[in-house]
């Protein structure tokens, strides 16, 4: 294998939040459920290898669930926000749990398909001021968060 290709997965928190706010008692599926998510990244790994590339996965950064909730419900009325919170089971912590499900799937995929995974999750969890690693939306990496990821890649090269 000549080349390395970095596969930086997306979060699984892509839901139609407006639809959830309108009908919090309904069944709402993410844009890509866990089964499809796993299949997509397994297929992405296979395609990279078929091209002669060595894939490397990147774990998902942590999220700040309260700021993430504020971001996904921005522009909603107080009642709509309450509806989304109801759908989440009454706590923004559920966002973190859903996010973790997808992140754990990446680690399993890496193990099952002998793919190196750059763990950006652990150093973020270890940082007592992790909130500084994220933009106000609670999901996007800040400059400091990007520097941390860059450091993890530098360590990989050693």
Image: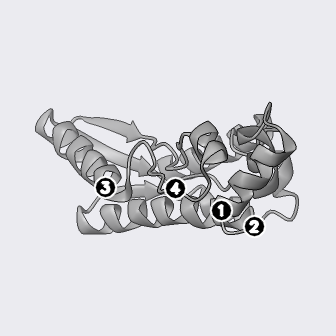
**Label 1: which secondary element:** loop
Q: Which residue is mark 2?
A: 91
Label 3 sits on residue: 38
Q: Which one is closest to the eye, mark 1 or mark 3?
A: 1
Q: Looking at the picture, tell me which residue is in the foreground, 1 or 63.
A: 63
Calculate the distance from the C-alpha at mark 4 to the C-alpha at mark 3.
25 Å
Q: Which residue is drawn at the image coordinates 84% and 52% (left, top)?
A: 131
SS for tag 4? loop
Q: CA distance from mark 4 to mark 1?
A: 12 Å
Q: In front here: 154 or 94? A: 94
Q: CA distance from mark 1 to mark 3?
A: 23 Å
* Rendered location of residue 35, percent (x, y): 30, 58
Figure disc tally: 4
| Residues packed near mark 2 inside 10 Å, few (<14), some (14 to 19) or many (20 plus) | some
Residue at image mark 4? 26
**Relative to 125, does residue 138 appear above or below in the rendering?**
above
Side of 154 where 105 appears, left or right: left
Write the residue at 40% across / 64% down: 105
State how far apart marks 1 and 2 are (Cα). Answer: 6 Å
Quadrant of the rendered structure where residue 22 is? top right
């Amino acid at each position: 294998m000549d080349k390395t290709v970095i596969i930086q997965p997306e979060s699984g928190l892509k839901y139609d939040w407006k639809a959830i706010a309108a009908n919090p008692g309904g069944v709402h599926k993410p844009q890509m459920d866990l089964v499809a998510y796993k299949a997509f990244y397994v297929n992405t790994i296979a395609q990279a290898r078929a091209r002669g590339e060595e894939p490397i996965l990147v774990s998902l950064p942590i999220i700040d669930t309260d700021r993430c909730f504020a971001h996904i419900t921005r522009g909603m009325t107080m009642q709509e926000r309450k509806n989304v919170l109801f759908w989440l089971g009454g706590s923004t912590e559920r966002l973190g749990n859903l996010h973790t499900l997808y992140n754990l799937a990446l680690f399993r995929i890496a193990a099952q398909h002998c793919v190196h995974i750059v763990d950006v999750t652990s150093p973020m969890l270890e940082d007592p001021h992790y909130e500084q690693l994220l933009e106000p939306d609670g999901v996007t990496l800040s400059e400091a968060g990007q520097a941390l990821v860059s450091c993890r890649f530098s360590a990989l090269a050693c």
